[in-house]
Amino acid sequence: MRKYFLLLLLLILTISCSKKVEVKGKITNASPLERIEIIEATGVGTLPIVNLGLNNKGEFSGNFEAPKDGMYALTYGGQMNMIYLKKGQTLDISGDGATFPQQMVINGDAKANNDFIKETQKYFETYASKINVGDMVSKDEKQFITDFKKIQSDLSKELEDAAKKHDADDAALNFKKDETNARLLGLIDAYEQNTAQSTGKPFKGSKTYENLKNAMLADHDRMIKEVPAYRDYTLNKINSEFQQFAQTRRLGSDTLLSDIFAKFLATKKEMSQTTKDYLLAYVLAQTDINFNNVKKYDHITKLIDVNIKDAAVKEDLKKLQNVLMGAKTGTTPELPLINKDGKSVQISDMKGKPTLVTFYTSWNPNVSVMTVPVLKEVVNFYKSKMNFAYINLDDTKEQFTKTSAAMFKGFPGENYWVEGGINAEPVKKFGIYGFKTPSYIILDKNGNVASRPFFNLGDPELVEALKKATGLQAPQVQSQLLPQMMPPVQEAPASSN
């Protein structure tokens, strides 16, 4: 009996401490090639957490580790909507493929908080449409404060009432309060700027005004970490000053926007290191960490190491760098593979000759229509000087077996699968996500990374890299269209479910 009790207690503790979000649902009129992705949307280098396929009935299920409680982006068919999730919740979603996820029904543990956010968002949109900002910011300070406090009171009451109505928890309520606070700070800035422009002098508020504003800024560092809208507000606040600073700098051909912004932040002695870390990370993620700057890989790494002090922010940026710029050339890659005979190998075992590696999934429509015909020409041209590996990232081994046989039958080279497919942790660590398929990299004869990721077999840079690896100059091939790449999500409108 005691043993049974201990096992039961262990089970309860395991369930209660789980961070996994269990997700399931059904989409009517769904396309079998479309996938659902869920992306954590409040970090500095956001990437998909889970990629879910649908069966022939439009049903889907899966789970993922939620890194934090908060807003997540849900994408399907090129559309996106926002949902609020907490660790350990169940999420049951449904909708019609024609309108999903812009219109969707949420059930499960996540229902209460999302119903609350949906209602308050609609209220705020209606309320905001009735505010005459131009008239409000032209009033004297006393009247502006009176009007502003009325807005604060109205919105606060709506949040409290809606939270009670839908039984939303404190975390969701506080999130909306923080987001509302960030939006209202924008109204205060508009008032200060309007007054300064009309008088020609810097705005100086009364003690009452400053107390009002300081109360809204009191939890600055936490807001910078947790609320994307507050980051936007802070960047907006310093944008004019930064533009003036940038105009005085001498810019070299290799100067990045992040270089200038880091120097600008260094002059802001009153700014906390937390603020500097998150603002610089935001600029890096939005402007400079991308495939176009692969030749500046070390430059960007140094920029992160020297200027970012927060270990979590630094880790997120380097993960994003690995995904959007590829692994650094010369490094030994790690990715466990399974060949068609069921034998386990490492991607770095591909040695003897340079290897062209193709990452693909059966559900990406570019593969069979556009990739395979061009790839066949490439393989036949280089086959005397190269090895070839086709790595399938489908959900199951059965799908891998079926797809590889259909697409690459008769192709020189080896077919591989990664257990767990696109959602496998080693795949994410390697830097491959759904939006990076199909893609290609070159390994040198020692199994080390020899190129950045490519998405187009006709890319002149890839052709040059293949020439360098093999000594062969390829004839021009028909250029593929680039697959649609989804940028990392920083912020989006709140859920309209």
Image (spheres, rainbow, N blue to C red):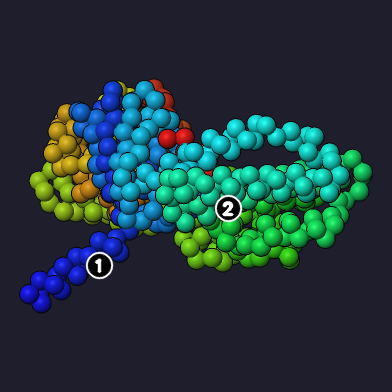
Q: Report if residue 126 is visible in the image.
A: yes
Q: Residues within 10 Å of mark 1 (few under 14, many from 20)?
A: few
Q: Identity of the amino acid at label 1?
A: Leu
Q: Are marks 1 and 2 in contact (CB under 8 Å)?
A: no
Image side of residue 59 versus residue 255, left or right? left
Q: How far separated are the C-alphas under marks 1 and 2?
A: 32 Å
Q: Report if residue 486 is visible in the image.
A: no
Give x and y (percent) for residue 27: 29, 30
Helix, strand or loop at label 2? It is helix
Image side of residue 434 versus residue 286, left or right? left
Q: Nearer the viewer, residue 166 or 287?
A: 166
- At x 12%, y 51%, the residue is 343
Q: Residues within 10 Å of mark 2 (few under 14, many from 20)?
A: many
Quadrant where the C terminus lies? top left
- At x 25%, y 67%, the residue is 13
Helix, strand or loop at label 1? It is helix
Image side of residue 116 versus residue 126, left or right? left
Label 1 belongs to which residue? 13
Give x and y (percent) for residue 347: 26, 52
Give x and y (percent) for residue 322: 43, 52
Q: Which comes sooner in the sequence, label 1 or label 2?
A: 1
Res. 178 mark: 2
Q: Identity of the amino acid at label 2?
A: Asp
- At x 41%, y 30%, the residue is 103
